Image: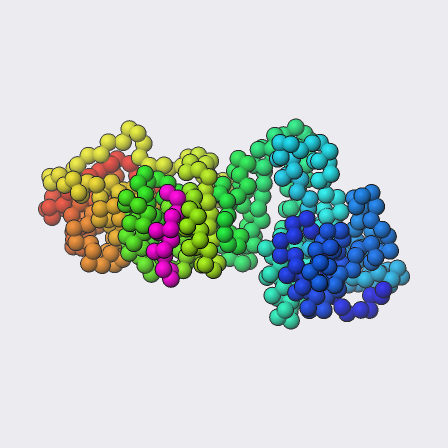
Amino acid sequence: MTTEKQQKRALLTVSDKRELVSFGAGLHNLGWELLASGGTARVLRENGIPVIDVADYTGFPEILAGRVKTLHPAIHGGILARGTAQDKNQLRQFEWDYIDLVAANLYPFEATVANPDSTLEDAIENIDIGGVALIRAAAKNYQRVTVLTDPEDYGAVLSVLEAGSDISETERKKLAVKGFLMTAHYDTAISAYFGGTDVKTLQAQRVDVLRYGENPHQQSELYNWNGQNGPLGGTLLKGKALSHNNILDLDAAWRTAVSFTDPTVVIVKHLSPCGVASANTLAEAYPAALACDPVSAFGGIIATNKPFDAAIANQLGDLFVECIVAPGFTEDALAVLATRKNLRLLEMSTTALAPSVELRSVNAGFLSQTLDVGDPASTEWKVVSERQPTAEELAALKFAWLSCQHVKSNAIVFAKGTATIGIGGGQPNRIDCVHIAAQRAGDATKGAVMASDAFFPFPDCVEAAHSYGITAIIQPGGSKRDHLSIEMANKLGLAMVCTGTRHFRH
């Protein structure tokens, strides 16, 4: 072996063998030399992919029933060597080669100790030594070496290589961070287990490293709560791993859906509900939710508070949907949805929300607050207008009020019956949100009701709502100028209800 070879070399040694064959085949087709050990080498060879066993490469056999395979200077020297003349000469002295890429992940320690039938010996045997050393070595030398610890990253790396490019140092650094996070969590899990921590507490420390954050140049990790292994405490039944933005949108949609009792469909795009509807069945609710803003629904998230069935699945038509989250999926629905490419399905185990607080980072600190789960039990609604709302208006106002609580401030919701017809939010002033909601609703505003998440500082929103055909309004009240809005409602013949409770969402 000499360091003069230009051929690229990859070491593959993985416990999680997802995507291994396609990745190994892709590297081989690009002319890479593949090194592998144990079961990884066997899987590659069984699939017709040429591979060199680590034992043959180092000239040293596996020992201690395979517990020592990759712990050899030829391996770690090839990984840790930099491109300097001194390092090249040392490799040449021992006739060792550079290793340019390491794909490694670890024995399933947490899954093993979570099994109630596992023994102490099982736990000990599932403490990975060589894998951790390989990941740390490759991550340390990220300026030259690419380290892959997640099969979800294989495709992106392979695409870059197939395009004739090298993996950028920026991307190698991101992958190195992912590797360090994996080994850090792994060591925490082991120390917690031997320190007597129960499995649920151990799993509460679980970190899922996502491909990137809101944008590709940002890093992102998901910290799961209370022993939940899946995103949002659910199980991903179909589709590739969820992104940072997927998780945010799914959370917003799910929180909205489970705040309703009747079968409800929620469509969310970029954290904003663009359609909410309740009906006797999900199939009846879906068309109404979609009609609220079909343009924004493209590429959105759908959430339901009841199991997703074939009747609603068949109604999706050719609408592109990123993800669907529901408390279950019927077998018939899964059969219908199986044909939809790139659709992710997240099945939730409970409709309960946890934790009961939410955190947001601010400069030099964090903000913590309890969740807004609706009006407090002590809330009393009051009709403040001369005209009482009709029974139909009151029912629509109740639905609009609940929907409004999930829209970014200054939130305005137009509704008819139990369906939103126009939603406006996230603007610096409330009157703009009234106009946006009206634009979304079009001619459907005639005879609709309006909800506002906070009070009206001026009567302009009431006047504008009337001009669009709104007949009844619900809002918290509490402005020094409430009397102006109430007087305007009376002048225009509108019914107005004040709840006394505000529902800002910044």
Q: How is the image coloured?
A: rainbow
Locate residue 64, reporting x and y percent.
Answer: 82, 43
- 338 versus 224 height, above or below: below
Q: Is residue 26 above or below residue 153?
A: below
* Residue at 79% from the left image edge and 46% from the top image edge: 66
Looking at this view, name the residue that lies furthest to the bottom: 164
Left or right, 220 with reference to 270: right
- Residue 249 in sight: no
Q: x%, y% of residue 159? A: 60, 65
Q: Residue at x 68, y 36 (%)?
A: 190
Q: Is residue 3 left or right of residue 403?
A: right
Q: Find out whether residue 363 is within the magenta segment.
A: no
- Identify the residue shown where x is 39% and y is 44%: 307
| Corner quadrant of residue 155 | bottom right
Relative image position of residue 47 (x, y in whole percent):
69, 60
Residue 315 colored magenta? yes
The residue stretch that appears in magenta: 306-319
Above or below, comparing residue 149 to residue 234 in the picture = below
Q: Main secondary structure of the magenta part?
A: loop
- Nearest to the observer: residue 359 or residue 304: 304
